[in-house]
Image (cartoon, helix red, strand yellow):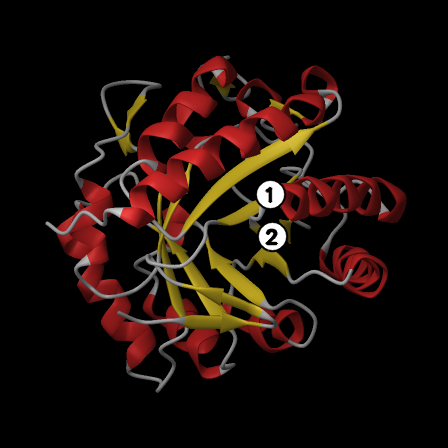
Amino acid sequence: MHNVQIGDLSVSNDNPLLVIAGPCQLEGIEHAQMIAGKMAEICAAHGAQFIFKGSYDKANRTSLSGKRGLGMDEGLKVMQSVKDSIGCPVLTDIHSPEQCTTVAAVCDVMQIPAFLCRQTDLLLAAGETGAVINIKKGQFLAPWDMPNVVSKIESTGNKRILLTERGSSFGYNTLVADMRSLPIMARTGYPVVMDATHSVQQPGGMGGSSGGQREFAPVMARAAVSLGIAAVFIETHEDPDNAPSDGPNMISLDQMDGVIKSLMAFDALAKADPLRV
C-alpha cells in the first residue's frame, strides 16, 4: 500500500480521509482564500485532511462561449496566495507538457483531466516534475485499464500517484459511477479518490453547458467513503447557481460542514474494518 506524502499530509487508503475541495474555476485571490479558509476550518474541526483545489483554465468547456478561467499566470498567483495565507497544499489541472514545470513550482498536486488520462507526453512530463500526480480515470476507461496509465507515471521514477473515479459515460449526456471501480483501482496500491461532484455531472446536458444533479453528490461521497478510500473530491461554492462553471454539480459551501461531518463518521467505520477485494 503506497503512502503518499503531500506536505504534512499522509495519504493512503488506510489513513484518515483526505478532502480535496474548492471551486471548479478560480475567480480571484479573495474568493479562493475565503473558500480555502472555510474548508480548512471545517476539515480541522472534523479530523479530515485537506487540500484546496481550483482550476486556472477549464480547457474542455462544452461550448466556445464557456468561461475558461484566469489563465495560468494569474491562477498560480492565486494558488500561491492560498498556500501562504491558509497553509494548506493546493491542487490544479494541467493540460499540456509545457505547463508541468511551471505549475509544479507552485502546486503540490497536479491533476490530469479525465479526457487527457492517456496522453503519454503529458503523463511523462508531469511525472518527471516529481510532484504528486492525481489522475482522473477517463469516462471511457474501465478501472482495470488504469494500471497502464499508472505505469507511464512510474516509468519516470515518480510513485507519488493518486487515482480518481469520476464516473463513466452511460448513454448520451449521462454518467454512472460503478463503486466496484474503487476497490479495483485500489489493487494498484495507490490512494483512491472519489470525485463526488463530477460523477453527478450531465456532460453537455444543457446544450451549451453541462448540467448536473448536485443533490446526489453527497450520496456518491457517502457510498464511496463507506468502502474505505483515501480521499473524496468535492467542488464547492458559496453560490453554485451563479458560479462560472459546473454550478449544477457543486455543493453549496454552507452545507459542507454537515457533509464532512457525516463523511468522517463513515470513514471511521470503514477504516476500523477495512474491506479488501
Question: Which residue is farthest left?
Answer: 277
Residue 223's quadrant in the figure?
Answer: top left
Q: Nearer the viewer, residue 23 or 211?
A: 23
Q: Which residue is mark 1?
A: 21
Residue position for label 2: 50
Specify whether residue 69 is in view.
no
- Residue 221: x and y in percent read 41, 31
Q: Earlier in the sequence, mark 2 or mark 1?
A: 1
* Residue 105 at x, y percent in the picture: 67, 77
Q: In which quarter of the view is residue 84 placed?
A: bottom right
Badge 2: how crowded within 10 Å, few (<14), some, or many (20+)?
A: many
Where is residue 72 drawn, in percent x and y?
A: 71, 59
* Left or right side of 108 for 193: left
Q: Which residue is located at x 82 percent, y 61 percent?
A: 77
Q: Amino acid at mark 2?
A: Phe
Q: Quadrant of residue 267?
A: top left
Q: How many marks?
A: 2
- Alpha-carbon span between mark 2 and mark 1: 8 Å
Element under label 1? strand
Q: Amino acid at mark 1?
A: Ala
Taking the image as shown, residue 76 lies to the left or right of residue 117, namely right
Relative vertical location of residue 245 with respect to residue 22 in this rendering, above or below: above
Location of the N terminus (image quadrant): bottom left
Residue drawn 35% across the image and 87% down it: 157
What residue do we see at 45% from left, 83% from top?
Answer: 128
Q: Residue reaching furthest right?
A: 30
Q: Is the residue marked by circle 1 packed among few (<14), some (14-19), or many (20+) residues within 10 Å?
A: many
